[in-house]
Image: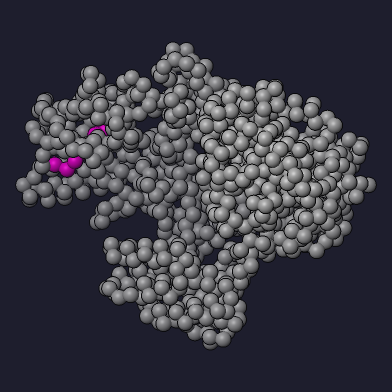
Amino acid sequence: MATPTGDVVAERLRVVQDLCDRGEPLDVIMRTVRSAGLPPDERRVFDAEVLSGSLGQRFDQAAKRGAARRRELVTLFRPYLAEVDQGVKRDLPVARRLAYHLVEHRPDEELIDGDALTKVITAAAEPSKRIRKGLRWYADLPFADELPHDLYRLRRSDLVPVTQIDDIVWENGRLRVDGYAYLAGLSVRSRRFNRATVVLRGPRWLPPVRMRTRRTLAPEATHAAREPGCNYDWSGFTATLSPWPLRWRSSLRAAVSAVRRKMRHRPAVQDTTTWRAEIVFWSRGARATGLLRGASLGRTERPAGLRIKPRWWVRPVWTSDRALQVVLQPNRAELTGVKLDGERLELTVFLPGRTCTKGHARLGGHRMHADFQPVEGGTNVLVTLAVPALLQEKDGRRLWVEPKGDPAASVMLGDALEETRAQVGDREITVLGDRRDRVVVSAHRIRPVITSASWDGAVLELRGEYPDAEGARRMSLRHRSGLMYHADMARSGDAFTVRLKPSEMERFGELVPMPSGTWNLSVRHPTGEIVPVRVSHAALPALDETRHSFAGRGYRFVSTRFDVPVLMAEESRPADEKGVAGTHVLRRVFYPAQRGEPLNDSTVYVVNDGRHYADSVRAIYEERLRRGDDREHIWIVKDGAFVPPGPATVVRAGSREHHAALARSRHIVTNSFLPAWFRAREDQVVVQAWHGTPAKRIGNDLPHMSRDPRPPVWYRQAAEVRGWDVLLSQSPWATPVLREAFGYKGEVLESGLPRNDVLTSPDREELAAAVRRRLGLIEGKKVVLYAPTWRDYDRKNSTVKLDLSLARAELGADHELLVRAHPMQAMPLVPAEVAHDVTTYPDMSDLLLVADVLVTDYSSSMFDFVATGRPIVFFTYDLEKYSSRRGLYLDLASQAPGPLLSKSAEVVEALRSIDTVAAAHADRYEAFRATYAPRDDGKATARVVDHIFS
């Protein structure tokens, strides 16, 4: 497909995208699309991009939203499509091509009142079957018997290359590239009729270079594929390259360039020649070409170069869009010396084979004076940088030298020069090479630098240097979700050592494995600044980046983005459970087969998709154990999040055993929605112990759930609710709310919430003491728990709205502050010296048990906490906004069992005089408890177990 050319086309595409993103009316968008001002060539490029991109997406949305939207769609699109070049429409992706053809040629009544457009759009959203007829491939989409056969032919825009590079190394002077590559939707089951060739294409007239390529077995390609039912096992490849074809082509280009410069009376200049790597497919009759992109994390991101002669290198490099290139690069300028002299940083650069006396240097975008001194064999250049100015810079900048009359030369790190880290007070100036050995100068807070990483069994040991001021430091490991772990740094002079066991990290007194994902390393400076950790460039070649497996999980310590260390964790899964292909077989084949087997007398327990051992589900399980129920108990556990006590069987979420357990267990107890592939059997009993009485609107009561046509989540909820047999309710008030919100017509058990029994248990003091010890709270201090709900319109905001520093200063040392953010909200930024962040504590009931005062807003915790009789303060700084955007089921102003406050200072003042505040709201508190929690009397769990399992 054509690519955007010219500023006018790009700007108009941006305008259309912006209109679509803002949800502007379709007629406004179409006026912009059809506006004049583009010459024919640019108009074709624009039409191709907009029809396959933003306008095509708006087309899909409108076609699904009822007859009125489809009428507007047909009215506005048909005249525009009549103006579009036939070649543009022919080369669109097949689903778009087909939908637009229907708009142009089908009667209005069929398009508006029928489902023709919806059928095509729905079928295109699913992985479509590819059909070969002769040597051509076609898509299996609706109306194939009614429309021209050529409409369904797969063209270049449909033959999408998928590539992944796993390794790039030099062997015996040759470059070897390993990875896999295939055309999405076309299986590659064997070597037959399956060819791929890596081709390097250089500047314009230079002949391309074909790398010697052979296919290899790569089952991981099938596991990583997004298309179910496709087999890409033989999509692997190994391509090798000798530098010689690059050298003579580069020499030829250099000779032509030298002649051109000489004709302009300028001396010849050595130049870099760049080849982009493409892969050419010929697979079962389909032929396509695509860029070779996608580097695996670690060593593949930083491929080494090969010096082919003095100051000449062949380097595989990655572009910003992760495409592979190979460059033949001369070192026109080399850094040979670095000297810190007071407030001056002196950099000495050597220009080999070039004599000049004038020029400039450039650091990033800053041009500066430089001294050029001819010497034997070239020119020495002295660049002087002011240290105070450098220390004000925030980002690293590349160093360039600009000899007069010559193009600027990027300064490369000399072979004999080590990288420099010069300490200036509590900051450092670094002169380092990047992944292409280009010199980068930066200044920042002194950073820990890892010089070695080794595994001692399951323990990862990191050693390095950190010449910062003495004092205790902790290395933080942060997940992208915001979850953090900390490990102590053992320091000796400038050296440090960190030992951690990823399979057993401490979390509130328990040892749990690190959740799957990528963990970034940093250190918090005493000033509060977060200082990133880096890997020494000298340590990179020998860094152990292999996968290490312990207790069913795999861990890798890798350096990504060249020198940024990360720890990667993942569950170990069998090959037949990996990727979309594995889950497709489990859901479409294995699970239906298991549903036909006899039921087992077992119970499956699921809390928040298997992430927690908590809530009413936990209470029901423990009550059954207390009664000696010896039937099989199965806990679904996601990502090794917990190990349930007692004789329960632990099943990994998403596994084959998970599908079998949900298909064949008689009872299923959950507190949220079950997987979308689950369908309850007639003789199964699904107990929905929903996670609390809702204060904010949920389910069908949300505005988007009532639009026409219904959103996909409406159908998802309806299918889920049909499988429920018993819904637990906290009160007679909650029952109709839950029924209406979920459209539920089945049995409701007004038992109270089992999770709240602990709040009125005779053993609550002993249980609370155990929780306090687990949280590290000092006995005798008053505990204030701040537990706000989430804002679906501001989920990524990690700011704690309550002024914790003010609360700490005003309440004094006899108070403990706990902050519990909602799991759907970004992890909060809680200073450890001010408050305890208990967001990741597994069970909210434990926190309510130890809290002396609850500060909340619109959270369901208000209904639970009244069982304790302890005071509640409402911090409702956005009550009007939240009520209008999300909506509430109750009028807090007249019913809340505590004061509604809008400022942090007011909340702190209420906490200081909490006894007076509680007394003032005593009557409303009792009325609130009688209305919303009448059955939270410590016997809710017994009522549930008696009703369902006896």
- Relative to residue 684, is residue 398 drawn left or right? left
Q: Is residue 273 above or below residue 735?
A: above
Task: Compare residues 350 and 667 and report the one nearer the observer.
Answer: 667
Q: Is residue 751 above or below residue 160?
A: above
Q: Residue at x 12, y 29 (%)?
A: 371
Task: Compare residues 864 and 379 and report the one nearer the observer.
Answer: 864
- Relative to residue 342, is residue 594 drawn left or right? right
Q: Residue at x 61, y 31 (%)?
A: 912
Q: Is residue 591 above or below residue 907?
A: below
Per the image, is 124 magenta? Answer: no
- Relative to residue 150, is residue 748 drawn left or right? right
Tell me if I can see residue 333 in this picture.
yes
Place residue 317 in its image quadrant: top left
Place residue 715 in its image quadrant: bottom right
Most distant residue in the left direction: 265
User: What span is in magenta?
Assistant: 406-413
Residue 649 image offset from top left, x and y in percent: 80, 39
Task: Compare residues 3 and 629 and report the one nearer the observer.
Answer: 629
Q: How is the image coloured?
A: one colour
Tell me if I can see residue 841 in this picture.
no
Specify the principal SS of the magenta part.
strand
Residue 630 image offset from top left, x and y in percent: 91, 39
Residue 527 image offset from top left, x and y in percent: 43, 25
Residue 710 image offset from top left, x and y in percent: 63, 68
Q: Residue at x 29, y 51 (%)?
A: 202
